[in-house]
Amino acid sequence: MDPERLITEAELSKLRWRCRRGLLENDLFIERFFQRHAQGMTARTADGMSRLMDLSDNDLLDLHLARKSLAEVDASLDTADVREVLSMLIEPI
């Protein structure tokens, strides 16, 4: 599968559902991400986002607030693709 292909509306819908979190703060970061990047989301970006969603709410919030690095939270997530998605999540308004 081509990692640079745009994801379909069905794939985007599934990803949005998967990204629902228990902490409002995480949901705010994630919703802003989708508002900015949903239209041009590639399979690679969607995979990076999905991998971040495997984290607990507290670990994800620590990443959003830059209290911890990816390496501190889960070294296996410290890849270029996941770092790119994280930077897209936390970019300022």
Image: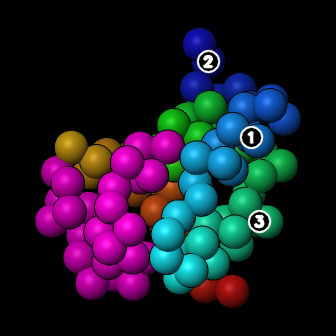
Instruction: Classify 38 as above or below 30.
Output: above
Residue range corresponding to the magenta coloring = 50-75
- Could you tell whether 60 is left or right of 8 in the image? left
Q: Amino acid at mark 3?
A: Arg
Q: Nearer the viewer, residue 60 or 2?
A: 60
Colouring scheme, one of rainbow, by chain, secondary structure, one colour: rainbow
The residue wearing badge 1 is: 12
Q: Secondary structure at mark 2?
A: loop
Cα–Cα span, label 1 and label 3 = 13 Å
Residue 56 x %, y %: 33, 61
Q: Amino acid at mark 2?
A: Asp
**What secondary structure do most residues of the magenta stretch adopt?**
helix
Q: Secondary structure at mark 1?
A: helix
Instruction: Classify 71 as above or below 66.
Output: above
Q: Nearer the viewer, residue 51 or 70?
A: 51
Cα–Cα span, label 2 and label 3 = 22 Å
